[in-house]
Amino acid sequence: MASMTATRRQMMQPRLDQPQPGPAPWPLHAALDLGALPTAPGCGRTWTSQILREWQLTQLTDSAQLITSELLANASLTGRRLDRPGLRLTLLSDRQQLLILVRDHDPGAPVLRHASEDDESGRGLMLVEAISDQWGWCPLADGTAGKVVWALLQAPPPGSSDLTVPFMPSAPA
């Protein structure tokens, strides 16, 4: 388990010697420009659901909507703080995997926080890490201020169970 955690932490650091996520190997591509508004996560969830239905990847909808919502919530908060209103949500797929990318104008690295039970926020990237197969971020390729935070989901093999909810212990009575 420790090696998996180390690998995920390494994914958060940009590896400029590795190919960055991009449209070349992904035959299915869709992008949505959004404002850095409180409504961006909801709009992104709805749009993601529609695109996955069109691409016949509905088995990824619940996970993709949650990841999209968390990444857009972080990006829209940053955009409002920096007074940089533009965000871009991009979905890429080769029908075996789905790559979710959210572009914002903050050049800072996303920070994975470990929120306590009393914290009202700070769990978004923990959820992204738990649900995605991989996630990370990279600076914008054109050198402008900003970054892309991305998450990868693998489509389950045909005929496998769609149940992917991790075990959640019940609350004490």
Image (cartoon, grey):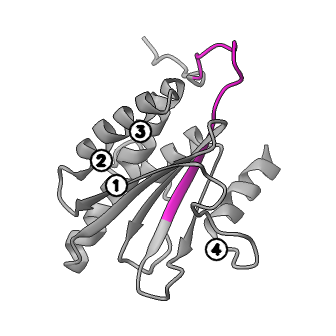
Asked whether disc 1 touches disc 4, contact meaning CB atoms under 8 Å apart, the reply is no
Q: Which residues are magenta?
A: 149-164
Percent from the top left, x then y, of residue 109?
50, 74
The answer to which of marks 4 and 2 sits earlier in the sequence is 4
Mark 3 crowd level (few <14, some 14–19, many ≥20, 10 Å Cα): some
Asked whether disc 3 touches disc 1, contact meaning CB atoms under 8 Å apart, the reply is no
- Mark 1 → mark 4, Cα distance in angstroms: 20 Å
- Mark 2 → mark 3, Cα distance in angstroms: 17 Å
Asked whether disc 2 touches disc 3, contact meaning CB atoms under 8 Å apart, the reply is no
Q: Name the main secondary structure of what is drawn in magenta.
A: loop
Percent from the top left, x then y, of residue 84?
23, 77
**Residue highlighted by disc 2:** 120
Label disc, if present, on residue 14 of the rendered structure: 4
- Mark 3 → mark 1, Cα distance in angstroms: 10 Å
Nearer to us: label 1 or label 2: 1
Q: Amino acid at mark 4?
A: Pro
The answer to which of marks 2 and 3 sits earlier in the sequence is 3
- Mark 1 → mark 2, Cα distance in angstroms: 17 Å
Image quadrant holding the N terminus, namely top right
**Residue that appears at 63% across and 43% down:** 94
| 151 vs 48: above or below | below
The answer to which of marks 1 and 4 sits earlier in the sequence is 4
Relative to 48, is 28 on the left or the right?
A: right
